[in-house]
Image (tube, rainbow, N blue to C red):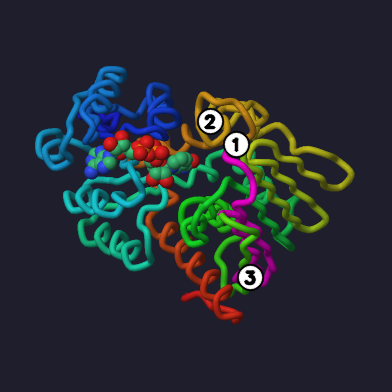
Amino acid sequence: MQPRTTARIAFIGAGNHATESLYPNIPMIPEFELVAVCDIDPPKAQRTARRYGAQAFTDVETMLDQVELDGCCVCGPAEMHHAVSLQVLRRGLRLFVEKPPAPNLRQAEELVESAAQHNTWGMVGFMKRFAPANVLAREFMDSPAFGTLSSLTLIHGCGPYDDLRRMMYFNAIHLIDLGRFLGGEVERVFAYQCNGGRSNYGLAATWMLRSGVAATLNQNSGQTWSDCSEAVYLTGAQVGIFIDASREVKITYDGAQFAPGAGLQLFGFRAEHSVSGNMAGWAAGGHYQRGYWGELSRFARACLGLEAPSPDLHDALQNIRLIEAMLESAATGREVKLPL
Ligand SMILES: NC(=O)c1ccc[n+]([C@@H]2O[C@H](COP(=O)([O-])OP(=O)(O)OC[C@H]3O[C@@H](n4cnc5c(N)ncnc54)[C@H](O)[C@@H]3O)[C@@H](O)[C@H]2O)c1
């Protein structure tokens, strides 16, 4: 029998983010066969299914009963991610779920447990791991020229949030995941929080990484949603790496500037090319470089067993543990250790 070259995948949710930033990538992923679209809003389900040549559904269970699938993507209001992800995992299907997969630690643990129980896995939409500038930085860090990590600084400013915890679960979780992607696991944290009036929150934290490196994080909601700012700076052994908005990376080492060109053709896009835009997504122009194509490509290929499913539900759980540790530290004024 010929090995299969496409994975049969359904997509639950046809709202703003999925429509603007996720679905448009699918036709450019050879291994991704979109066979069904489900949204409780019938016009959205029908419009999206028609556009991408898939079958439309308005009920998740009906779709899962009727369509033979390898995997299923979930992108709805964050409040429904946990419940719908369990519906997918309990059928033994591979899952791709947008962040945050759950609104608290217990439910994030439940997703990890359910995946193991049903002998399957779930990837989570931490797209910064697939943004070419971050991939390039990570590749350079793995080269002998970098040495070992000696410092890491992470900054992100977004538009207003009415609640600090919500800002951390909905927005900071991307930066936190990027921090773990670049710096590895965190052993303990110390954090302060502040409120600059109304919806302008700030959280500043120091992380002690398991590698013994000290890292700092500044997440705030004092900027505007029309564009956000992100900066990552890290050092190795006489090497500096500055990543602007997951879009451009500048590597300074041994008198030379910029990395050699090997990573410049990642995922079919040039590193300096702006694929995606501001928070509105694919169509909007602006500041960010995203990794939506990369994450969906990885999911389809992982469904076929061609690549490992990563980042996964364990990463999401670890990111949520970090959020809870920082919130606890900020509330108590004490250092908080993360579980091993
Ligand atoms: N990774 C990123 O860069 C990024 C950016 C923006 C949003 N997001 C995430 O994307 C998700 C969606 O955000 P949005 O702004 O597109 O929301 P949205 O409200 O526009 O879309 C959600 C869609 O889900 C549908 N839906 C709700 N419950 C359903 C169910 N049980 N079954 C099927 N369909 C259901 C709704 O009808 C709606 O069409 C959020 O979780 C958000 O955190 C991620």
SS for callout 1: helix
Could you say where residue 69 lies in the image, as x and y percent from the top left? 20, 36
SS for callout 3: strand
Could you say where residue 36 lies in the image, as x and y percent from the top left? 22, 29
Instruction: Give the number of the mark in front: 1 or 3.
Output: 3
Please report the residue visible at 23 percent of the width from the left and 32 percent of the height from the top: 41
Q: Is residue 220 above or below residue 336?
A: above
Q: Which mark is residue 192?
A: 3
Q: Which mark is residue 165?
A: none
Could you say where residue 280 lies in the image, as x and y percent from the top left? 51, 32
Could you say where residue 182 lies in the image, as x and y percent from the top left? 61, 54
Amino acid type at mark 1: Pro
The quarter of the displayed image where residue 6 is located? top left
Between marks 2 and 1, how big is the CA–CA gap? 8 Å
- Pointer 2 with pointer 1, Cβ within 8 A: yes
With 235 as the anchor, is 22 left or right in this view? left
Residue that badge 1 annotates: 132
Please report the residue visible at 64 percent of the width from the left and 51 percent of the height from the top: 222
Q: Is residue 301 above or below residue 216?
A: above
Give the camera-side residue of 195 and 11. 195
Mark 1: few, some, or many residues within 10 Å (few <14, many ≥20)? many
Between marks 1 and 3, how big is the CA–CA gap? 32 Å
Please report the residue visible at 34 percent of the width from the left and 41 percent of the height from the top: 75
The magenta segment: 199-226
Q: Earlier in the sequence, mark 2 or mark 3?
A: 3
SS for callout 2: helix
Q: Earlier in the sequence, mark 2 or mark 1?
A: 1
Amino acid type at mark 2: Phe
Q: Which mark is residue 267?
A: 2
